[in-house]
Every structure is written in C-alpha cells, then in structure tokens.
Image (cartoon, rainbow, N blue to C red):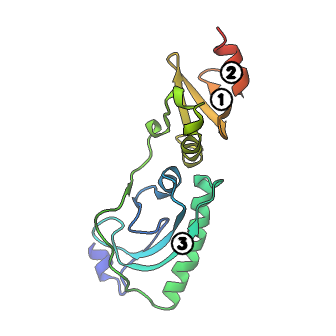
C-alpha cells in the first residue's frame, strides 16, 4: 500500500463488473450464472481492501443469452482499456466511494462449481438455469455430473445436453449416450 500512496496519482484498476456488484477474482461467470441482465466494467482506484476503491468510471452492457465467459470477459476488458485511457487522459483520479456491504462476491471458480445433479439435466424447468451455468463455466470448470460413479462432462448444451463425454471415453451425442449407456 505504501507504493500506491507514494505514486503521484495512486493506482487504477480495471474490473470486469459493475462494482460494487461482483467484487472478487472472477466476476464474469457469476454474472452469467446468476442471470444478471446487465454487467459492465469499472475503473477504480486501488485501495487497501480488494476491489473497494473509488469508482472513477463505469460502462454498462447487456448480458446476452448467448454470452460465454471468455468472450464476455474479453469484451469487458476491451471496453475497460478505453475507459482507463479516457480517465488517464482527463487526469480523472478521484471518484465515488463504493457501498461496502450488501453485494455478492465473485469467488474463484473450483471444479466443484461445474457439478450438476444428473436428475436435473433433462428437467425442462431447469433448462434455463443449466444453460446459464454451462455458458458461465465453459470451458472451465465446465458442466459435469456423475453417472453410476463416473464423471460425465457436458460438452454442448442447449435446452438439454447435446454432446457428452464419459470419463475414459470419446465424446458422443446425448442420444447415443442415453441409448448405449442407459438403455439397460
């Protein structure tokens, strides 16, 4: 923190969310999986507490029903780069303090975040939520389940799985998997 204080204008950070919503290490997948209709990018001052500096600039964009984490993250950082250049060129280094409570935190993803109960994969009432989860966690940690003790990766999903891969096997269509593996 001493280094930041010694710099003439402090430090700035580009964060891919509309702070204070989704502070933390990986906000983009959490915005998708929870069904946020908008997200954005924030330029904030560096502070002692993670992602809690003053908001210098923000831009809001819609989250489309086809957005996947890597592409949305790239789009946000491109917008953020322009926002940062604009803030620096205007020498705009003081902003608005953030609320510090009442907003969700974007924890780092783990492999377990991609797990989905087998029974829910074909449930029409769950298809929207699972589709968001697939888009949010693709390519990592991915969407997966367990079938008879084996890991089954969902490689493509729309309203139901399209392509799956049982551990140790090659990818197959969902229909092939159900007919070959579940037909007993």
User: Does residue 54 appear left or right of residue 126 in this picture?
Assistant: left
> Closer to the N terminus: mark 3 or mark 2?
3
Residue 24 in the image: above or below residue 41 = above
Quadrant including the N terminus? bottom left
Give the residue at mark 1: 164
Identify the element where label 2 is drawn.
Answer: helix
Residue 111 in the image: above or below residue 50 = above
Q: Residue at x 65, y 35 (%)?
A: 160
> On the image, which quarter does residue 138 sit in?
top right
> Closer to the N terminus: mark 2 or mark 1?
1
Residue 12 in the image: above or below residue 9 = above
User: Does residue 127 appear left or right of residue 11 in this picture?
Assistant: right
Q: Residue at x 61, y 65 (%)?
A: 75
Crowd rating for badge 3 (residues with CA inside 10 Å; few <14, some 14–19, many 20+): some
Residue 101 in the image: above or below residue 11 = above
Quadrant including the C terminus? top right
Instruction: Tell me how far mark 3 sits from mark 2, CA to CA.
Output: 41 Å
Q: Residue furthest top?
A: 184
Instruction: Tell me how far mark 2 sits from mark 1, CA to CA.
Output: 7 Å
Give the residue at mark 2: 177
Give the residue at mark 3: 60
**Viewer-side residue, 172 vs 38:** 38
> Closer to the N terminus: mark 3 or mark 1?
3
State yes or no: discs 3 and 1 in contact (Cβ < 8 Å): no
Please count the marks in the image. Answer: 3
State yes or no: discs 2 and 1 in contact (Cβ < 8 Å): yes
């Amino acid at each position: 923190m001493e280094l930041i204080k010694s710099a003439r204008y402090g430090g700035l950070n580009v964060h891919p969310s509309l702070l204070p919503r989704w502070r933390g290490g990986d906000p983009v997948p959490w915005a998708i999986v929870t069904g946020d209709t908008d997200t954005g990018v924030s330029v904030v001052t560096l502070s002692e507490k993670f992602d809690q500096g003053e908001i210098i600039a923000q831009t809001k964009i819609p989250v489309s029903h086809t957005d996947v984490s890597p592409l949305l993250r790239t789009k946000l950082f491109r917008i953020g780069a322009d926002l940062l250049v604009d803030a620096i060129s205007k020498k705009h280094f003081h902003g608005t303090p953030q609320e510090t409570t009442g907003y969700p935190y974007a924890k780092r993803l783990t492999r377990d975040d991609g797990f989905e109960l087998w029974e829910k994969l074909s449930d029409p009432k769950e298809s929207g939520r699972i589709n968001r989860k697939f888009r949010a966690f693709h390519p990592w940690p991915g969407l997966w389940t367990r079938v008879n003790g084996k890991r089954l990766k969902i490689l493509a999903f729309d309203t139901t799985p399209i392509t799956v891969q049982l551990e140790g096997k090659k990818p197959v269509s969902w229909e092939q998997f159900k007919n070959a593996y579940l037909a007993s």
